[in-house]
Amino acid sequence: MKKEDCIFCKIANGEIPSATIFEDRDFRVMLDIGPATRGHVLILTKEHYDNIYEIDAETAGKLFSLASVIARAMKKVLNCDGMNILQNNGTVAGQTVFHFHLHLIPRYEGDQVQVTWPQGSITEEEKEELVKSMKKEI
Ligand code: AMP
Ligand code: ZN
């Protein structure tokens, strides 16, 4: 379903022009307008899903399969040293456009991109509790 006021719906469905490098029935792959690094790419679903909780597993599977193809092409063209695959859900996680999209961020030695975090810790008790409760929901 299309959302009238969603900019990524308009881009995904071609109503607003974009720097598209690939599209098929389900996805549009385009350059990010505010790239973290040279060659930053977004994969958008053509259907509107707010986030990872809404997208169906089959589409998500197809999307990641496409991501691997795109990543290989990017590596070849950009000659990047590494790549982060990132997908933000919720404002607290950095989501600013509430239409599902995957970031492919090429990384270069010496770039200033920050996607790492200080390592935390977990107790045996917490581990046990989390494994038990998560297992139940899957
Ligand atoms: P997020 O913060 O994960 O929701 O990512 C939104 C991304 O969309 C940002 O990296 C923006 O630079 C990018 N973006 C926003 N508007 C456009 C647009 N019109 N064309 C291409 N990329 C866009
Ligand atoms: Zn949308």
Image (cartoon, helix red, strand yellow):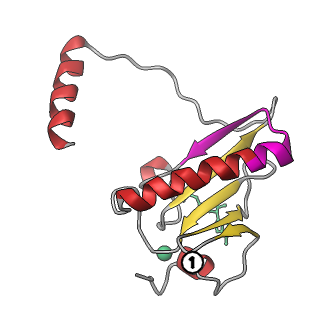
Quarter of the image that includes the N terminus? bottom left
Reply above or below: 84 against 1.
above
Give x and y (percent) for residue 19. Answer: 76, 70
Question: In front: 88, or 135?
Answer: 135
Q: Give the residue at the far top of this rendering.
A: 124
Membership of 5 in magenta stretch: no
Give x and y (percent) for residue 111. Answer: 79, 35
- Mark 1 highlights which residue? 7
Which quadrant of the view contains residue 131? top left
Q: Residue at x 55, y 75 (%)?
A: 25
Q: How many marks?
A: 1
Question: In front: 33, or 44?
Answer: 44
Quarter of the image that includes the C terminus? top left
Give x and y (percent) for residue 84. Answer: 63, 40
- Write the start and end of the magenta stretch as one range: 73-86
Reply above or below: 134 against 129.
below
Q: Residues within 10 Å of mark 1 (few under 14, many from 20)?
A: some
Hey, what amino acid is under mark 1?
Answer: Ile
Give x and y (percent) for residue 58. Answer: 39, 59
Question: In front: 59, or 120?
Answer: 59
Q: Is residue 98 left or right of residue 13?
A: left
Q: Residue at x 26, y 13 (%)?
A: 123
Q: Is residue 129 left or right of residue 45?
A: left
Question: In front: 110, or 56?
Answer: 56
Q: Is residue 119 left or right of residue 69?
A: left
Q: Residue at x 51, y 23 (%)?
A: 118
Reply above or below: 127 against 100.
above
Q: Quadrant of ligand 1?
A: bottom right
* Secondary structure under the numbered disc 1 in the rendered image: helix
Note whether ligand 1 is within 8 Å of mark 1. Answer: yes
Q: Residue at x 72, y 75 (%)?
A: 18
